[in-house]
């Protein structure tokens, strides 16, 4: 009997030991699941914050302001939660690399344990990092307006003379926005459509791009009021419309702006602002449009006349994209404010293409 009682005592000790081990594994499994869920939410938060910060490089019409990028990133980060708890601004660190157009967001915080407290572990430290990059170049865009903007559109000189100026008065050269182009940011211009073969292209005039699958004035007008959904890709050639699109241009812009258009409110801390009809300020607007840019100076058959010969099947390539804020209509002219531009990096369009044709992407993480 003593032996049996002794054995029972040993079994009880073993069972107790196994229960401790089992409790340890249970606590580890449960708490690891909690940590994983918390870390996943934290990673999403820093990724979103980094992208918001990098997007400052896109909407900024002048030199990017690091403080603005930091503010935008922090605002997005602290609007997120982990396990139902808001992110503490004190746990977030943000760095902005202006030359490389990078924004890095780090989040480090302590997460409390549940079952692991029985083992003396009250909390663990979780750290995540998100890094986003705004490319200096465009690849293509899947939401544009059907306007083919000449590279010299904002010069006061006729196109071919603008090409011959020293330095050339063009928006984009060698895949980059030129110093001349940067000097035009934030300025208002009058632009209007023109058809090829009707005389020298004047300053401010542009052609209507012929969109695959679209034809005629009605499609053209609708593409202005909404957007061209077919991707327009860098370094690919596109034809231009041969009809008179002055009327459809006015109608499309009027439809886009609507009865209560946004109003330009200037540049504050490097960011363009627009005032809505209710008085609120925003850095985005339905009147911000993207249009492809073609190279007047490099296309064959255009200079020195400044026009394509009548009857020519005009086909020119996209060398960049311009971001413009539409402010109104005066006669056949559209009042447009130049906000930003990007030169083409190559004939590639990916899911990372941003609304302004400049890719903003996460470049690496833990």
Image: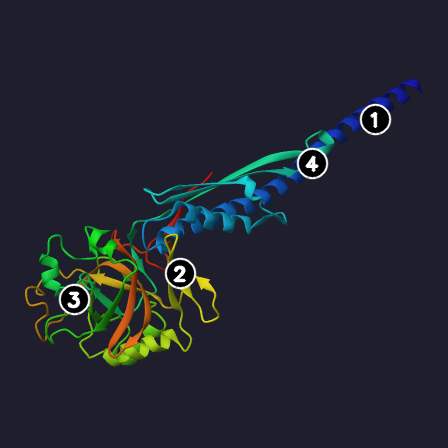
From where the camera sits, is residue 18 visible? yes
| CA distance separating discs 4 and 1 | 22 Å
Sooner in the amino-acid sequence: mark 4 or mark 1 = 1
Other residues around mark 3 within 10 Å, as few (<14) / some (14–19) / many (≥20): some
| CA distance separating discs 1 and 2 | 74 Å
Q: Of discs 3 and 4, which sits in the foreground?
A: 3
- Residue 186 position by quadrant: bottom left
Determine whether the residue tagged by mark 4 lies in a helix, strand or loop: helix
Q: Which residue is mark 1?
A: 12
Q: Of discs 4 and 2, which sits in the foreground?
A: 2
Determine whether the residue tagged by mark 1 lies in a helix, strand or loop: helix
Colour setting? rainbow
Where is 247 relative to 74, above or below? below
Q: Which residue is mark 2?
A: 273
Sooner in the amino-acid sequence: mark 3 or mark 2 = 2
Q: Which residue is mark 4?
A: 27
Please tell me which residue is depicted at 59% across the width and 35% down the height of the picture.
125
- Residue 61 position by quadrant: bottom left
Number of numbered discs visible in the structure rendering: 4
| CA distance separating discs 3 and 4 | 68 Å
Q: Of discs 4 and 1, which sits in the foreground?
A: 4
163 vs 248, left or right, is left
Q: Of discs 1 and 3, which sits in the foreground?
A: 3
């Amino acid at each position: 009997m003593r032996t049996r009682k002794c054995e029972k005592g040993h079994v009880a000790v073993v069972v107790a030991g196994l229960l401790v081990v089992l409790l340890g594994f249970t606590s580890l499994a449960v708490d690891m699941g909690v940590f994983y869920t918390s870390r996943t939410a934290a990673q999403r938060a820093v990724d979103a914050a980094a992208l918001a910060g990098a997007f400052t490089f896109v909407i900024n019409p002048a030199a990017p302001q690091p403080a603005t990028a930091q503010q935008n990133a922090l605002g997005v980060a602290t609007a997120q939660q982990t396990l139902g708890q808001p992110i503490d601004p004190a746990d977030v660190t943000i760095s902005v690399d202006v030359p490389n157009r990078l924004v890095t967001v780090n989040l480090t915080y302590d997460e409390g344990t549940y079952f692991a407290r029985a083992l003396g572990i009250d909390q663990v430290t979780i750290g995540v990092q998100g890094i986003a990059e705004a490319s200096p170049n465009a690849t293509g865009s899947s939401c544009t307006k059907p306007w083919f903007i000449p590279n010299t559109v904002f010069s006061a000189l006729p196109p071919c003379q603008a090409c011959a100026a020293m330095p050339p008065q063009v928006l984009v050269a060698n895949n980059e926005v030129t110093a001349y182009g940067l000097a035009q940011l934030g300025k208002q211009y009058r632009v209007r459509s023109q058809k090829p073969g009707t005389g020298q292209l004047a300053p401010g005039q542009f052609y209507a791009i012929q969109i695959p699958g679209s034809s005629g004035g009605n499609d053209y007008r609708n593409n202005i009021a909404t957007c061209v959904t077919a991707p327009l890709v860098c370094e690919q050639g596109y034809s231009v419309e041969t009809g008179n699109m002055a009327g459809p241009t006015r109608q499309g812009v009027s439809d886009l702006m609507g009865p209560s258009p946004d109003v330009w409110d200037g540049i504050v801390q490097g960011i363009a602002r627009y005032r809505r009809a209710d008085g609120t300020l925003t850095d985005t607007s339905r009147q911000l449009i993207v249009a492809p840019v073609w190279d007047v100076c490099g296309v064959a058959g255009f200079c020195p006349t400044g026009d394509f010969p009548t009857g020519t099947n005009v086909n020119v390539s996209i060398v960049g994209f311009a971001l413009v804020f539409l402010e109104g209509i005066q006669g056949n002219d559209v009042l447009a404010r130049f906000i930003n531009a990007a030169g083409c990096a190559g004939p590639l369009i990916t899911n990372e293409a941003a609304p302004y044709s400049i890719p903003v992407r996460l470049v690496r993480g833990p």
